[in-house]
Amino acid sequence: MPSTPTATSPSPSADPGAAVETAYRNYWDAVVNAYGKGSVQGTDLKKYAVAEAYLQVKTDVKALKTKGIVATGKPVLAPKVDSVDANRQTPRASLTDCTDISQWTLVKKSTGKAVALPEGRRTKYVTKVEAEKWYGSWVIIKVTPEDQPC
């Protein structure tokens, strides 16, 4: 009599980095939304960013709003999870991204015209990211753009 295959549940060790990368991409979706509307209100930013990461976006968006500036388009991301430490009381992960903001443009909200930015500014750079697992979900706690091309 042939054996019947049994259903197996996913292994807890199945790529824990995938959930971290998803949280990071969701964080960026919320950031793009906030920059596009000139406010973190009505975005999912609080769901994916906490601590320094949340405060930095909130501060940047507020500063741009004061100048009447929003962003159009979106950055191109290429994140790679460097480490996941699930054995800590609060699991922690780090990733490195090659962030390309060349298609993410700052514009005057009133006119839609692009804002002049310094020539030679870096539009593709390394970003270091720290995440933690809070209440069962990964959240971004710190995002550090580096002055390093990728």
Image: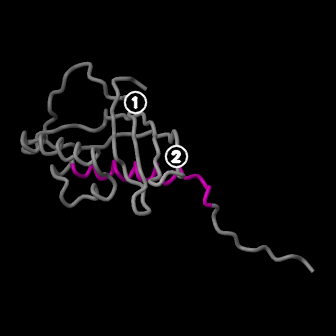
- Residue topped by disc 1: 126
Dominant secondary structure of the residues highlighted in magenta in the image: helix
Disc 2 to disc 1, C-alpha distance: 19 Å
| Quadrant of the rendering where the N terminus is positioned | bottom right
Side of 119 where 11 appears, left or right: right
Amino acid type of the residue tagged 2 in the rendering? Val
Which is closer to the viewer, label 2 or label 1?
Answer: 2
Q: Position of residue 96 (x, y in %)?
A: 45, 36
Q: Is 80 rendered above or below residue 1? A: above
Q: Which segment is the magenta one?
A: 12-34
The foreground one among 11 and 108 is 11
Q: Position of residue 119 (x, y in %)?
A: 22, 19
Side of 94 where 141 appears, left or right: left
Which type of secondary structure does the marked residue at label 1 adopt?
Answer: strand
The foreground one among 120 and 129 is 129
Question: Which numbered circle lies on residue 84?
Answer: 2
Residue at point 33%, 51% (across, down): 29
Residues packed near mark 1 inside 10 Å, few (<14), some (14 to 19) or many (20 plus): some
Q: Earlier in the sequence, mark 2 or mark 1?
A: 2
